[in-house]
Amino acid sequence: MSNENQNNEKRDPLLCHWADQMANQIIREKGDLDSYTCASGITPSGTVHLGNFREIITVDLVVRALRDRGKKVRFIYSWDDYDVFRKVPANMPDPEVLEKYLRYPITEVPDTTGRNENYARHHEVDIETQLPRVGIAPEFLYQASRYRANRYAEGMRKAMQNRAVIKECLNEYRDDQHKMKPEDVYWPVSIFCGKCNKDTTEITDYDGEYGITYKCECGNCETADIRVFKGAKLGWRVDWPMRWNEEKVVFEPGGKDHISPGGSYDTAKLVSKRIYGWDAPVTMRYDFVNLKGVPGKMSSSKGKVIALPDALDVYQAEVLRYLFAGTRPNTEFAISFDMDVLKVYEDYDKTERIVYGIDKPKSEDHFNKEKRIYMLSQIDGKIPEVMPYQITIRQLTTLLQIYSGDFDAVIKALGDVKPEQEERLRRRIECAWFWIKHSAPDCAPEFCFELREPSKKAYASKEMYPAIKNILSEVVPKIEAFETDKDCQQAIYDVATSLGIDTKALFLALYNVLIGKDQGPRLGSFFRIIGKKRLEKLLSSVEIDDGTAAKKNAGNQKKLTPAEIDKLPLAERFSRRVILKVSKIEKVEQHPGGSFLYILTLNCGDEEPRQIVSSIVNFYKPEELLGKNIVLVYNLKPANFRGVRSNGMLLAASDPTVTDKDTCEVIFAPQFEVGTVLEPEGFNPPEEELCFVKPDTFAEMSLHAKDGFVEVDGKKIGADGKFLTVEVYKNGKVK
């Protein structure tokens, strides 16, 4: 491209972003088409993590750029769920069960969490239900279904007939040491045995058309017609270009390990042209996404992953999109959940202020670039008519802790939130609350506090008591008159100066009487957020120390951080992480979107009933459940099951020697009152509030049945001297 064209692209608002430049390249190279097919895909062999999401959103951004040019675009996402199950990921429950299915197609591997019909679907559903939250809606293609429907029989026949040419293509970029020799046998098709279902097979003959003869390690031998046989598939280096032609793909990005010179894209490009007569799609390289502080790329098989729902717990959808839209795909970067979260939000808000004319851009090109990034960051791709309400995560965490996590109270306290701003602000509040409860205790403990109730006495030394009373009479009445946090902060300094006391000592005393800690939020801001009325009550209840102030101000026992809890013995860790509550089934409905799912309405002893989704249709009739007391994992992180939100899961036992699909015994609890909280023997419910626990974390707790009792780490689960029992699977798994 000439320098003049490059300069024009910088000046054009629709050409200042890499996605727009890629859209233009696609149109230049592929011409004016009726429709442009852009593709992405992955093997659902493990958790679909943010590294995988980078490919998805890279395609989405280019798709949006094409559509902004008035082009019709088809965005397809292929689930390569007919690939072989090669390795058990580190973060999946019951690895010993999964190991039995190594070398099977992924769609034939059971979902050991019991949520979905198979292992592949478990990971597919996770991403399919989450992508709409970030404004991405591809057309999903399921390769297992397509192969089993013999849709690719002609593509496989063409590959088998031209295997010598494919062999040349694969050798094109290999050095002499790694090239296949002329005498080496090469088959582009692999076979899942029709008897044992594994790919432990060897092709022994081909009839030149559709007939493939193979033998398997299990002893099975047969000749299969690939027009009707459901166990044949192409190896991925041929499957990829075959599907480019099948779907008429014009754009598909690839990871740097695939797009490197002589890599799989280069060989696929040759196969696509020489075998299937299709010019390879335009591509671009995307780099790895890492976790801050953890070396190397994310890996589903190693269990070292952050999935899309995890990121959306901390980042607003628009802010998460901003991270990717504002970074060129070929740039490696790290997703952080520590203090960097605050900086990411600040950067996003800065861009937003530039777009709405609040902050001044450096130049016209800078404005166009920031506006385009902001537009591509929006879920619907449109800039809101009314500027979203801005408040920093730091400020929100302070407000949330002052109001004990009451979102409505926080919004009310802000006072100037417009109705059209509230929905997006509420999402930011949810993210800030999750961050302060789950991330900050480890990375920013100084951010975490609990405001003392005025009814609880606080104590100050004889030296500090007069200063606190002075602040009560001189500073607090002026709180609403201070124009800035700095003004309030200075007023506190002035009190210390006028009384001739050490400023640091005064601040320490104030923090201790307010939150029982030696440090906290900046006092000027903190005072203004707490407000005049609450400060009056808090400081009025301070008394002179009689020598035991430190002990009295401590109030509650020290709360443990998540990292500290992880080091505890399993039973205590379970007690501090999980809430098991006895609940009564009051209604049983068939899930409209799943034949094996019930929707259960529960009485948990709360003011409002609770709804959960459970995959027990094959084991229990509605009348066998109605009116029964069950055990609910009360604080399990909510999840959507085929469009229905489930707020918890019930406990059930199963035979440990077979898959969870085949056995299930709901653990009934008639011996307990509704609302009873169950704990490991010897433990009481913790005083501190428990946060949501993720399904994988709960699975790691290793609940099981022993001699008919449910236990964890040798401790029976129960309350008031009574314990949970299992009738059938007395020594089974409990999930």
Image: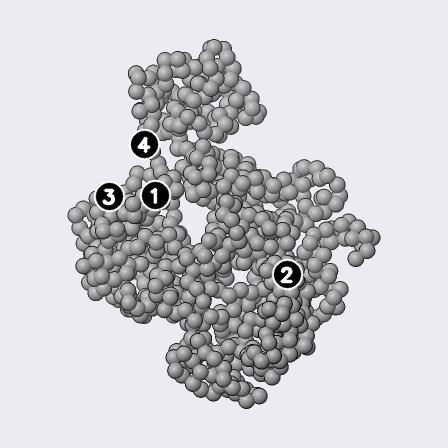
Gap in Å between the C-alphas at discs 3 and 2? 56 Å
The location of residue 383, given as percent across then percent down, is: 64, 49
Front residue of 341 and 178: 178
Q: Earlier in the sequence, mark 3 or mark 4?
A: 4
Circle 3: element type = loop
Gap in Å between the C-alphas at discs 4 and 1? 21 Å
Q: Which mark is residue 322?
A: none
Side of 630 where 599 appears, left or right: right
Side of 236 where 363 appears, left or right: right
In the image, what residue type sits under mark 2? Ser
Q: Earlier in the sequence, mark 4 or mark 1?
A: 4
Number of other residues with Cα within 10 Å of mark 1, as a class: few under 14, some 14 to 19, many 20 or more: few
The location of residue 522, given as percent across then percent down, is: 50, 27
Circle 4: element type = loop
Viewer-nearest of labels 2 and 4? 2
Residue drawn at point x = 56 percent, y = 65 percent: 41
In the image, what residue type sits under mark 3? Phe
Circle 2: element type = loop
Residue drawn at point x = 36 percent, y = 69 percent: 100
Number of other residues with Cα within 10 Å of mark 4, as a class: few under 14, some 14 to 19, many 20 or more: few
**Residue named by callout 3:** 683
